[in-house]
Every structure is written in C-alpha cells, then in structure tokens.
Amino acid sequence: MNPCQACGACCATFPVVFTVDELDEAPGGRVPASLAERLTQATARMRGTGAQPSRCIALVGRVGERVECAIYPSRPGPCSEFAPLAALGRGDAACDDARRRHGLPPLAPGRP
C-alpha cells in the first residue's frame, strides 16, 4: 500500500494554491471549481487549505490511519508534484514536516 494512503498529513497541513487554468471551468482544466476558492484572477486554492487548522476539502478519512483524495485523478498540480518519492516510502523535508505536525514519524525506505 502507498504510505500516502495511510497518512494524509500534507493534505491537512499545507495550503494548495494553483492557477485557475486547472479549474474544470477552464478549457482543459480538471479540478472541480466547486472545491476551490479564487484568490486572485490567476490563482485559486483548495477549500479548507487556507483555514487553521488546515484540511483539504477533498481529503477523506483520518490522518495517520487511512485516507484518500476524493478527486485524485483531478487533483491540482501542487498535489501531484508533492513528495514524489513518498509513494516509495521516502519522504522529503516537507513530507516529514507535515507528518511531524500530526504526530507521525518521518518516512524512511521500507517504513510507511
């Protein structure tokens, strides 16, 4: 199992800001506009990720136990680019920071 599916800390820690071109109301966009809020003419943010505590509206489940992204195939660029090695069990500084904030140990090879 992908360690991200038992974590979700990044989705409940960081703001997810992306260009409005990724919204499904734009030609070729895929992110559901109903799940985002416009920040400027050019940028949007996933709802919930600007709040304190932060939690993406598309995150389903309990952080640190079992989670999934309700819009995984349509998630914004920052989500698909975040912690590219996490699926292999290797986090980076941002991944480890998010996990620490939720009381989870850092990812290490072979340890989800």
Image: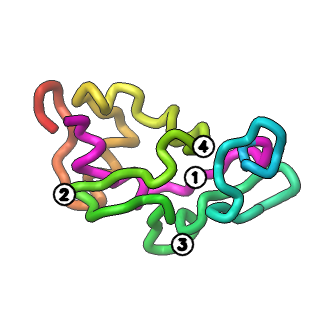
Q: Residue at 36% across / 37% down in the picture?
A: 93
Q: Amino acid at mark 2?
A: Glu
Q: Nearer the viewer, mark 4 or mark 3?
A: 4
- First in sequence: mark 3 or mark 1? 1
Dividing the picture into quadrants, the one containing residue 36 is: bottom right
Q: Is residue 100 left or right of residue 33?
A: left
**Residue under numbered circle 3:** 51
- Residue 112's place in the image compared with 68, above or below, is above
Q: Nearer the viewer, mark 1 or mark 2?
A: 2
Cα gap from disc 3 to disc 2, whole angstroms = 22 Å
Q: Label 2 crowding class (10 Å Cα cut-off): few <14, some 14-19, many 20+?
A: few
Q: Which mark is residue 65?
A: 2
Cα gap from disc 3 to disc 1, whole angstroms = 11 Å
Q: Is residue 31 left or right of residue 53?
A: right
Q: Residue at 34% across / 33% down in the picture?
A: 92
Cα gap from disc 4 to disc 1, whole angstroms = 8 Å
